[in-house]
Amino acid sequence: MQSRLGALEEGKEPVTASRISQSRPFPLRLLKFFLLFLIFGISASIVSIIMVRRFGINTVPLLVQSSTFRPCFEQSGSIESWIRPPSNLLHTMNDSELFWKASFVPRIKSYPFKRTPKIAFMFLTKGPLPFAPLWEKFFKGHEGLYSIYVHSLPSYTSDFPPSSIFYRRQIPSQVAEWGKMSMCDGERRLLANALLDMSNEWFILLSESCIPLQNFSIVYRYISRSWYSFMGAVDEPGPYGRGRYNEHMAPEVNLSDWRKGPQWFEINRELAVRIVEDSTYYPKFKEFCTPHACYVDEHYFQTMLTINTPHLLANRSLTYVDWSRGGAHPATFGKDDIKEEFFKKILEEQTCLYNNQPSSLCFLFARKFAPNALGPLLAIASKVLRI
């Protein structure tokens, strides 16, 4: 007997039936432990249920309530979760998901919260923003009245410092080719991302070669007080207007509906939603308006909005472009063009209608400017552009 006990103390495994019978107390003690644990767990659950039902006290262990725990469907205690703009623009939604989410429109027009309408400045670019320093001066001091979105080539990575207004303002992008539907896709992508911010009321499309012609206060006042959205849409005869129409676009688009205008627009939230949600005209333009017979960025939005909401369009753009030199592209202005006389022509020698009344203030932005124009522009910004 002593030899067997000695063998057990030394850790040797018994091999006889009598040794096996002496090892039975260990699993019995283990069984008792599990039984006690089960009784304790059941008792704790019963107490927890009684406390919650009678007193509303949550007795869930603190470990479960820690900040690392997140329910599958997080319930919001306020409206903030619905109206808060995305903290990170680099989401993982594809275009279909993005457009679907962006097309949500409240049926009740009044807002149940304090809303300060903002202007979304949307930059459709290939890469860098050479006039970022000028735009920094333009936006300075007007935080809370604007949002910025940048759609560049997917291969481009910006290097703006954290202090810049352009820091982390790039949205998920795809290649946008001139004259093709992918260009309009990029514009719709910008609009959709900007629509996710409920405070954005007006939407301005700009390029990397655009500059402001007025200070922010004038721009905000001009756009926010306008009865109309600014989308150039004219019925232009000849080969570069009606001549680009394809009869296969009927009946959705007829020749009498066909419009042409600049790519660069300034529109309100209602029209932005119409552009993003469109599935009626998009297939027609994608199939039958292709280079070199047709350039979709000059016709798609212009024609669609003329068909659906002609009463909301001013039929002009707020972005100055010089086509007087001819060719497929407008004039590009370099450092030698940046003179006071140049801007006097744009800012003073113009006539247009603003809210159905004659006005000399017709343009708020201008393009195309070469990167070497930045220095001279910064030099005259305060005097000429009042920035």
Image: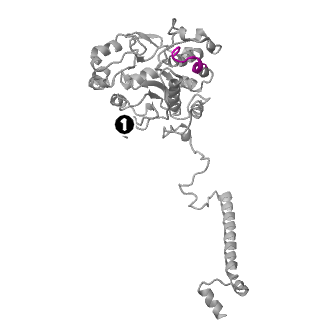
In the picture provided, is 369 more to the left or to the right than 177?
left
Q: Which residue is mark 1?
A: 164
Q: Is residue 7 above or below residue 282?
A: below
Q: x, y (%) of residue 204? A: 46, 24
Q: Which residues are magenta?
A: 284-294
Q: Nearer the viewer, residue 202 or 35?
A: 35
Q: Position of residue 67 (x, y in %)?
A: 53, 55
Residue placed at 52% from the left, 25% from the top?
A: 182
Residue 157 image-quadrant placement: top left
Query: Where residue 82 appears, x then y in whole percent?
Result: 56, 38
Residue 107 place in picture, x, y as percent: 62, 29
Q: Is residue 266 left or right of residue 16?
A: left
Q: Residue at x 58, y 21 (%)?
A: 286
User: Does 245 lie within the magenta span?
Assistant: no
Which residue is nearer to you in this view: 293 or 259? 293
> Horizontal placement of 107 versus 319: left or right?
right
In this view, 316 is above or below 107: above
Residue drawn where x is 59% and y is 26% of the image:
277
Secondary structure beneath dot 1 equals loop
Residue 46's quadrant in the figure?
Answer: bottom right
Query: What color scheme is it?
Result: one colour
